[in-house]
Image (tube, helix red, strand yellow):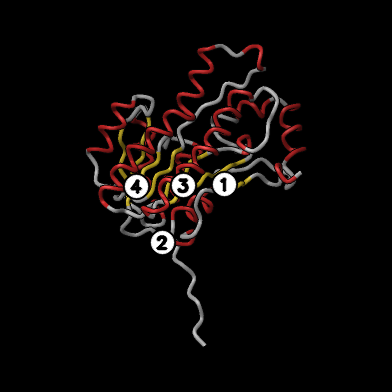
Amino acid sequence: MTLPVTPSFRLDGRRAVVTGAGRGIGLAAAAALGQAGAETWLLARSSDEIEAAAAQIGPLAHAAVLDVTDIAAVEAFFAGQPAFDILVNNAGTNRPKPLWEVSEVDYDAVLDLNLKSAYFVTQACVARMMAARVRGSLIHMSSQMGHVGGPNRSLYCASKWAMEGMNKAMALDLASYGIRSNTIAPTFIDTPLTRPMFGNEDFRRSVLGKIKLGRIGTVEDLMGAILFLASDASALVTGTSLVVDGGWTAE
């Protein structure tokens, strides 16, 4: 009898790039990929955090200042790089407000960063992958709010539901090239972006009432999911969403 061998979660010899990598989920993604052996590029709009993070991750980690809302700069960055094997589309924002208070400025800020930037970062990255015949993995950081609705989240839900549809269509476009596309859809994660929200006890209590495992998520809760989708362990996984929500969307 020949036993099957578990596919490797190691990423040695592969190149990864993470947007919004200076803190929170992006930093955790970069750390997970770097710890698994990937040469990892950390991208953000300012240099201090990503340079410090890259130094901690190790000699195979690099920092580059990039505003992903600047499409020309995005194209120039990827055109100047060898093909990446792994993309983590993480840069994003939120402006929680009820529908009737949302301005056009709010709309543009959320949709431009969460959706438009993710789309064109993917396009630029994929162009290099296809030219080099790299069979790679695209990971888009979505949200449980890309599967359900929530009060004061009309903009955020719009961006993340759109990302989920974008992901499925991209997976179909890219399947024949051996490039996989998936999302990760977390529940509320304790990050610098969300931490101020939890100072409101009513809000915190409402969130914990929805997360069936009874706790706010941590960035470490997402690192295994990121590594799974980046590695050969998920070789047949594309066009889907890995929901890491403590049971929120099960009800």
Label 1 belongs to which residue? 241
Name the N-terminal-most of marks 2 and 3.
2
**How far apart in space, not on screen, are marks 2 and 1 (Cα)?**
22 Å
Q: Secondary structure at mark 4?
A: strand
In this view, the mark in front (4 or 1): 1
**Distance (Cα) linking label 3 and label 4:** 23 Å
The residue where tag 3 is placed is 171
Name the residue: 58% across, 49% down. Answer: 242
Closer to the chain start, of discs 4 and 2, is: 2
- Disc assigned to residue 40: 4
Residue drawn at the location 60% of the way across and 14% of the way down = 102
* Residue in the image at 30% along x and 50% along y: 60
Q: Of the residues shown, which amino acid type is indicated by label 2?
A: Arg
User: Taking 54 as reference, is 205 left or right?
Assistant: right
Q: Are marks 4 and 1 in contact (CB under 8 Å)?
A: no
Judging from the image, what secondary structure is the residue with disc 3 in?
helix
